[in-house]
Amino acid sequence: MLLVAGALLCSAATRPVVMGTHGMAVSGHPLAARAGVKMLEQGGNAIDAGVAQVFAQAVLEFNLFGLGGECPILIYSAKDKKVYAISGQG
């Protein structure tokens, strides 16, 4: 019984939870997640939300994060029914 109670306490969020209605964004900082959700709420797609989060994260946790690096991406367009690959290296 104590083990179950302890597990429930450990699974509680230690940071604020950012909620959206028709999408989600996950980030190491709640304000960066909020930037992603806000982008989705304003009609953006997953790529728009991800870019918003990257820029927010670069400001919020500059000591842990940088804009340089690699970012390989696969994008499925439901409209075109195609998959696009972006190397993101260089």
Image (tube, rainbow, N blue to C red):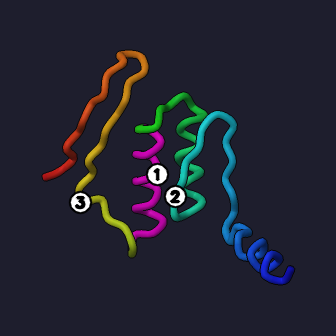
Q: Position of residue 31 (x, y in %)?
A: 58, 58
What secondary structure characterizes most of the magenta part? helix
Observer-nearest of 44 and 6: 6
Q: Tag 2 or tag 1, which sits nearer the N-term?
A: 2
Residue 56 lies in the magenta stretch: yes
Q: Tag 1 or tag 3, which sits nearer the N-term?
A: 1
Q: CA distance from mark 3 to mark 1?
A: 16 Å
Callout 2 crowding tier (Cα within 10 Å): few <14, some 14–19, many ≥20: some
- Classify mark 2: helix, strand or loop: loop
Q: Position of residue 23 (x, y in %)?
A: 60, 38
Residue 69's disc number:
3
Q: Which residues are magenta?
A: 48-62
Give the labeled residue for mark 2: 27
| In this picture, residue 29 sits left or right of residue 22 | left
The amino acid type found where label 1 is placed reads: Gln
Q: Position of residue 42 (x, y in %)?
A: 57, 32
